[in-house]
């Protein structure tokens, strides 16, 4: 693996997760990565159908409002479609404090094809998930 700040963060998060999962199964790395993939494709499906209601079960109110804003902005531009997820990495893990719930940050990378023409766009985003009981909800997209 090439040494980089991102690979260091992935290693640190992995080390933290290996300890946290012993206390609570919600911190299972594989399940968290699968959840991120699921939410990504739910958002893509909601974009295609222009139906943000599909997302309510997977996102916080804050992220829901952000998705609505993104959908409105993208509809006025040359849209990209057929987004394919390439890689999901957990880069940050934080246990709850008095002021904030358990949370983790995932780095997602992938590609999108323009609906007009053949251009392909690589993308990289950071999504933060927060814990609500025994479930993770997307809270923030950067």
Image (cartoon, helix red, strand yellow):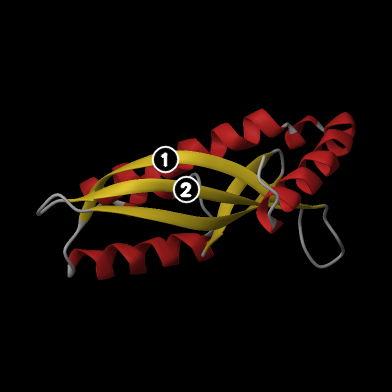
Find the distance from the CA under tag 2 to the CA under tag 1: 6 Å
Left of 60 or right of it: where is 84? left
Q: Residues within 10 Å of mark 1 (few under 14, many from 20)?
A: some
Q: Residue at x 49, y 44 (%)?
A: 57
The picture places residue 121, in percent across and down from the top left corner, at 30, 54
| Residue at point 56%, 36% (across, down) | 35
Q: Quadrant of the N terminus?
A: top right
Report which residue position mark 1 lands on: 85
The vertical placement of 134 against 103, above or below, is: above
Name above or below for residue 1 compared with residue 12. Answer: above
Give the residue number, with chain letter if any, for mark 2.
109
> As rendered, which of 33 and 39 lies closer to the eye?
33
Q: What residue lies at 86% left-to-right and 38% top-to-bottom?
A: 20
Left or right? Give the position of 19 relative to 90: right
Q: Residue 13's spot in the image, x, y percent?
A: 77, 46
Please give the label number shown on residue 48: none
């Amino acid at each position: 693996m090439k040494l980089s700040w991102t690979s260091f963060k992935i290693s640190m998060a992995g080390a933290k997760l290996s300890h946290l999962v012993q206390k609570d199964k919600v911190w299972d790395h594989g399940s968290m990565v699968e959840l991120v993939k699921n939410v990504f494709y739910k958002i893509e499906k909601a974009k295609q159908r222009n139906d943000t209601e599909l997302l309510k079960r997977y996102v916080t109110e804050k992220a829901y409002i952000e998705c609505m804003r993104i959908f409105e902005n993208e509809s006025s531009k040359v849209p990209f479609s057929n987004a394919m997820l390439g890689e999901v990495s957990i880069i940050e893990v934080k246990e709850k404090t008095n002021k904030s719930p358990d949370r983790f940050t995932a780095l997602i990378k992938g590609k999108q094809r323009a609906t007009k023409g053949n251009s392909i766009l690589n993308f990289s985003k950071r999504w933060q998930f927060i814990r609500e009981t025994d479930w993770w909800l997307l809270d923030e997209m950067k």
